[in-house]
Amino acid sequence: MSARIVLYCDREWRDGACPRQLLTPAATVDDARRYGARDGWRTEGDRDFCPLHGGPTGRTATVRLHPDPSTGDTPS
């Protein structure tokens, strides 16, 4: 029986989390992170981030909400 380690993107936001994952043939976490790095994954501390999110200092998907001044609505 062989071990495989899966990297999961740790990017979270208020309503959910990134579903991306990377199945690696690695037997150790360090080897899995090396496989991930070749595919653009980043590790910050003990957290892994997919190429889209890139971690706290990398690219992130951002949604900007603008309040409607005519109604006084503000984003929560």
Image (cartoon, helix red, strand yellow):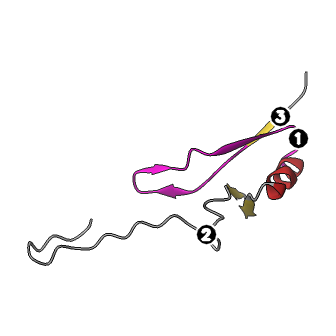
Task: Report the span colored magenta.
Answer: 7-29
Q: SS for tag 1? A: loop
Q: Quadrant of residue 65?
A: bottom left
Q: Quadrant of the C terminus?
A: bottom left
Mark 3 residue type: Arg
At 78% from the left and 54% from the top, the residue drawn is: 39
Farthest residue to the left: give it.
71
Residue 20 appears at what percent x and percent y? Answer: 62, 46
Neighbours of disc 2 within 10 Å: few (<14), some (14-19), many (20+): few
Name the residue nearer the viewer: 8 or 46: 8
In this rendering, the answer to whether 33 lies above or below 5 is: below
Q: Relative to 34, is 45 above or below?
A: below
Which residue bears the numbered disc 3?
4
Q: Is residue 8 magenta?
A: yes
- Numbered badge on residue 59: 2
Report the residue at 67% width, 43% height from top.
21
What residue appears at the point 64 percent right and 65 percent down from the top-left corner? 55
